[in-house]
Amino acid sequence: MSPLTKALRAASAAALMGASVIVGTATATADPGTGSSADINTLAANLSKGYGLNTCQPAPLSGPILAELDCGQSPDPNGPAAGVYQLYSNGSDLAAAFTGGINGVSLSPCGDNGQSPGTWHTGSTGATAGQVACGTYKNAAVITWTTDAKNVLSHIRASNTDVNALYQWWRTNG
């Protein structure tokens, strides 16, 4: 799909068409064109802090994607303007989607993480959790990352070009 997942699915369907945001949890109901409810719920469990099935919408599927959630403005006023989260069935498809997802992004270092793309780590062991890339796309800061153990690809976009601020938000909430 890309260029940056079709500009973050048209800025997450224009911020979910102005929908009001209520933080909480919900359970997915399946639509054959948007994946199984099990896959949608698996993906929902991997959303950035503040996002949930009440702030994100299942999207039509293409290619090897099992489920996709398109999210508007984060409930956190310092959070991203939009996000797209995708579930894949295997690591090969995930890696290919990551590479395709950063095509066209003007890459820049991810905060203190160094060169982009690179890897990100979790926990005190420093084990690699996935890949991460930071930069700008169409005058907006973007971060794309994988959660390899879950086969999840995530993209978030800011409303400005401040890559470092978006990266710091991601480190705390991503």
Image: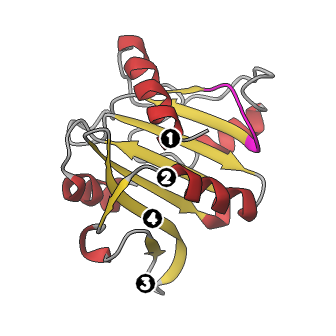
Distance CA(mark 3)–CA(mark 4):
19 Å
Labels 1 & 4 near each other (Cβ < 8 A): no
User: Quick check: marks 3 and 4 in contact, CB under 8 Å?
Assistant: no
Report helix, strand or loop for mark 2.
loop
**SS class, disc 4:** strand
Label 4: which residue?
132
Using a 10 Å C-alpha cutoff, classify the residue at mark 4 as few (fewer than 14 neighbours), some (14 to 19) or many (20 or more).
many
Q: Which stretch did the figure color magenta?
A: 59-65
Seen from the viewer's position, the closer of residues 36 and 112 is 112
Q: Which residue is mark 3?
A: 124
**Left or right for 114, reference 46:** left
> What residue is pinned by disc 1?
3
Q: Is residue 62 magenta?
A: yes
Tell me the CA gap for discs 1 and 4.
Answer: 17 Å
Indicate the position of residue 53 as horizontal and vertical percent values: 54, 30
Q: Amino acid at mark 3?
A: Ser
Can you see residue 117?
Answer: yes
Q: Nearer the viewer, mark 2 or mark 4?
A: 2
Residue type highlighted by circle 1: Pro
Residue denoted by label 2: 103
Q: Are the two marked residues, 2 and 3, in contact with CB atoms closer than 8 angstroms?
A: no
Image quadrant occupied by the C terminus: bottom left
Rounded to the nearest angstrom, the CA distance separating label 3 from label 1 is: 35 Å
How many labels were placed on the picture?
A: 4
The structure residue drawn at horizontal position 72% and vertical position 34%, both measured from the top left corner, is: 62
Q: Earlier in the sequence, mark 2 or mark 3?
A: 2
Q: Residue at x 45, y 54 (%)?
A: 144
Main SS of residues in magenta:
loop
User: At 63% from the left edge and 53% from the top edge, which residue is drawn?
Assistant: 97
Are there few (<14), some (14-19), or many (20+) residues within 10 Å of tag 1?
some
